[in-house]
Image (cartoon, rainbow, N blue to C red):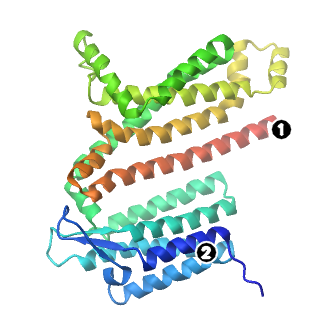
Amino acid sequence: MTIRFDKLGVVIAAIAAYAVFLAPFATFRANRIVPGQARSILEALPATTGPLLLAILVAAALVALFRTPLALRLAASVVALVALALLIGAAGTFLTPAGNTFARVSPASGFWILIFAFTLLLADVLTRLNLSPWARIGVLAAAAVAIGLLLMSGSWNDLSILKEYTNRADSFWAEASKHVTLALGSLLAAVIVGLPLGILCHRVESLRAGVLNVLNIIQTIPSIALFGLLIAPLGWVAIHVPGAAALGIRGIGTAPAFVALFLYSLLPVVANTVVGLAGVPRAANDAARGMGMTDRQRLFGIEFPLAFPVILTGIRIVLVQNIGLATIAALIGGGGFGVFVFQGVGQTAMDLVLLGALPTVALAFAAAIILDAVIELTATKRRVETA
């Protein structure tokens, strides 16, 4: 009998082996800013739990290494991820001295590498299963519920990142609101401006190159530089335009961050609108003209619906991009999760950095999955209607 290895599984198994046997699983610090002491899996967990986790991880890595059935690979990845999520919390409780409120226990590099390896295995399995859009959204919802239940259970309360959250719970949700508002608000403004501009560029070919070139130039400006460039003009507007300051327009804060994100968002929206409308079959337009439809009727009844999946792809790019870029808004007082990232960098407190970084990554990941599913559903619907 020939033993066959899975190519991706070899990589996953090698990564997992390094993380299990060579990399630290958790880090213990006497307080939040002193250097940490690395702990392996067996050192970070009780005598019975450590070997159990090792056995689960080794078994899951072996399942990934060989060409095993998809159902077994799915079960192995899920079990490994659940075990890691539960037992890192147990490590926090085990390593924290009783009654000590200053000690900090954090997941170390081995934990994050293992999460990456088995998430990669899970993603590979889900891709091979070719799940429907609704099924993918269901998997995302199930993962969100599981993480929510884990956080509510209190099993992670002894981890440093949860202690940082407890100390900043009110400000965390305030900054979360600012982050989402910046990302979604700038996207909405870009759609309101970008869709008509894209339609105009599609209709007037002489205008297209100039507009897209200007938007391309804006896109190449580094985000921090663009935020800085907007401080002076918006500060002037706040001083000299009556009522501008009352609306929140000023040189630093939310206004320049919003404007910068809006400018960055225009190119994907405008470009995808032009590409989508240009891709509408000529036969569909000719048939609409033959039926006596006006240009306006053809635009909203034929062209725009057929181009919508491509336009939605641009909106997806913008949303994921804005969720990430909104983090930098904290540098100019715009708020958002970047507040915790830059505070953590300044205080050499990596768990505070994670308090801002992890929700940002989670939001971007969820937005990408949901909009990918919506795009596929929309494209499928259009294919059925035109068939």
In the image, residue 49 sits, relative to residue 368, either above or below, namely: below
- Please report the residue visible at 28 percent of the width from the left and 59 percent of the height from the top: 351
Residue 179 in which image quadrant: top left
Q: Is residue 9 left or right of residue 85?
A: right
- Please report the residue visible at 60 percent of the width from the left and 46 percent of the height from the top: 372
Image coordinates of residue 50 in percent, x first then y, are: 38, 84
Q: Secondary structure at mark 1?
A: loop
Q: Secondary structure at mark 2?
A: helix
> Can residue 160 be seen here?
yes
Residue under numbered circle 2: 64
In the image, residue 139 sits, relative to residue 25, either above or below, namely: above
Q: Which residue ends up furthest to the bottom in the rendered image?
A: 48
In the image, residue 299 sits, relative to residue 49, either above or below, namely: above
User: Which circle, 2 or 1, is nearer the viewer?
Assistant: 2
Specify the amino acid type for callout 2: Ala
Q: CB of mark 2 within 8 Å of CB of mark 1?
A: no
Residue under numbered circle 1: 387
- Please report the residue visible at 55 percent of the width from the left and 74 percent of the height from the top: 14
Depth order, front residue of 350/146? 350
Q: Quadrant of the N terminus?
A: bottom right
Image coordinates of residue 274 in percent, x first then y, are: 65, 24
